[in-house]
Image: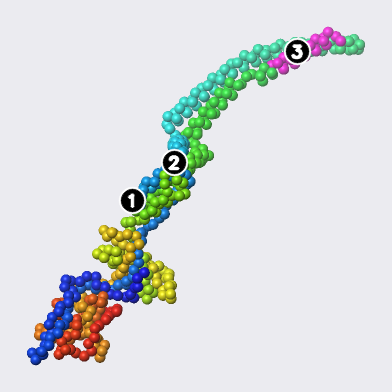
Amino acid sequence: MKKRRTLILVVVGVLACVGVVFVVPRLLPASSSATTNVQTGRVSRATLSAVVESSGSVTAEADATLNFDAAGTISAVKVKVGDVVKQGDVLAELDTRDIELQIAQQTQSYLSQQASYSMTITPDPAAVKSAQIALDNANAAYKLAKQKYAVNSTDSVSLSCDNVDNAKQTYDDAVNAYNALLTNWRVVVNGSFEISPQKAQLDRAKAAYDQALASCALTKNGVNTTGIQSALMQVQQAKTNLDNLVSPSERTLTLAKVQLDQAKLALDQATRQLADARIIAPFDGLVTKVSGIVGGASSAASITLVDAGRYHVDVLVDETEIAQVQLGQQAELTFDALPKAKVTGTVKRIDPAGTVSQGVVNYKVRVDLDKTEAALRIDMSANVRVILDTHSNVLAVPGGAIRSDTTTGGYYVNVVDTTGEAKRVDVTTGYTDGDLTEVSGDLQQGDQVYTSEPPAAQAQGGFGLFGVRAVGR
């Protein structure tokens, strides 16, 4: 880095003829036999600025070394050093055929789940109508099954249970006959009623009656209800289908959303794999380095990209001056490699912490360069002048015209009067860059002033070339 001056005051612009030096013959009295040459300049109007000056090098606003994020074989390197690329351009890629097939499959799966989720939230009217028809048909089938069951069960029970009444009548008759037998005392006395024909008939009637009752009960319990049950299940299923379409449950909605999210995640993962298999420009820029060849391993590939459209220069500013530097201040830049180029910029960043080097504290200041047609290149040396303040349209004289009065401590200039003699004019100095110095006093634009010692006959005590380092107004 070049040596910086603590504070210098620079000319921003001057009017034509500023600082023009004239060589005129010294006007001597008639008795003088010798003549000498003296130098003069003009009082002019100019714009002078106070600046902080430092130097640095040109740096791209963005600078990135790009690599593959996936392992594989390089199938294409699409750029070379010096190429200008746009954000999103594919600079190099691996063999991605398998990944692209996977993406196609995951895309179809995602679209299918997306359609399913949409239909869950807002069912297709045609699907609702179809479900309603299915429910109506199921209800009709169920009604018919019940009718058939009623007819079939009545006939079977009737046939089976008619014998119960007949068996009951026979049994009742047998009971009456047996009871009548028991009224004969001789039979009771000798106990012959237990082996009588009436007793045997009673036992047979009782057994037949019990069998008829059992057969009737079995018939009632054994009537086939499979048709009704099947029809009822169809009704319940059709109703469930319709309800799920019209008013899906929270569980159904959650499940559909989860399935959609899973399909999206699978698609994103496949897409990410494709992105990892490509080197893509993250910004508009200039390719400055390319490594890796087609057929080589992805680990050997890298591409360096810089933002050639935006530059900045970082400079160091002494701690005694940093308080004067503010964000947004304008700056002027010149370049050793481009002597005719002049670029402007703006202070965009001031580091809050300083850097200590050999006991000197400096603060890094970043200057963003304005767009320019200058042929800038990265790392070019740059001279930066941050403009702190500007005085416009002020009177200025060449720096060599300022004289110091050792008695008063003030300053003055020697104006060339109409006779060629030196006329002292006291002035107050302001900004200066060493070539021009701002002055105020009894001067007019265009006045001619001595920049060297005036003729000896007009010389006044206390002369000496004035050197201003940082003069305030």
Q: Earlier in the sequence, mark 1 or mark 3?
A: 1
Q: Residue at x 56, y 23 (%)?
A: 231
User: Where is residue 426, by image quadrant?
Assistant: bottom left
Q: Is residue 52 in the magenta section?
A: no
Mark in the foreground, 2 or 3: 2
Q: Position of residue 161 (x, y in %)?
A: 68, 14
User: Where is residue 442, by image quadrant?
Assistant: bottom left
Main secondary-structure element of the magenta-colored stretch: helix
Q: Residue at x 39, y 48 (%)?
A: 280
Residue 378, placed above or below residue 251: below
Tag 3 residue: 208
Q: Amino acid at mark 2?
A: Thr
Mark in the foreground, 1 or 3: 1
User: Where is residue 197, by image quadrant?
Assistant: top right
Residue 364, placed above or below residue 85: below
Q: Earlier in the sequence, mark 2 or mark 1?
A: 1
In space, the residues marked 1 and 3 are separated at their CA atoms by 112 Å
Q: Amino acid at mark 3?
A: Ala
- The part of the chain drawn in magenta is 195-216
Q: Amino acid at mark 1?
A: Asp
View extreme (top): residue:
197
On residue 116, the disc is none
Tag 2 residue: 96
View extreme (right): residue:
190
View extreme (left): residue:
30
In space, the residues marked 2 and 1 are separated at their CA atoms by 24 Å
Q: Residue at x 48, y 40 (%)?
A: 263
- Please tell me how many numbered marks the rendered image carries: 3
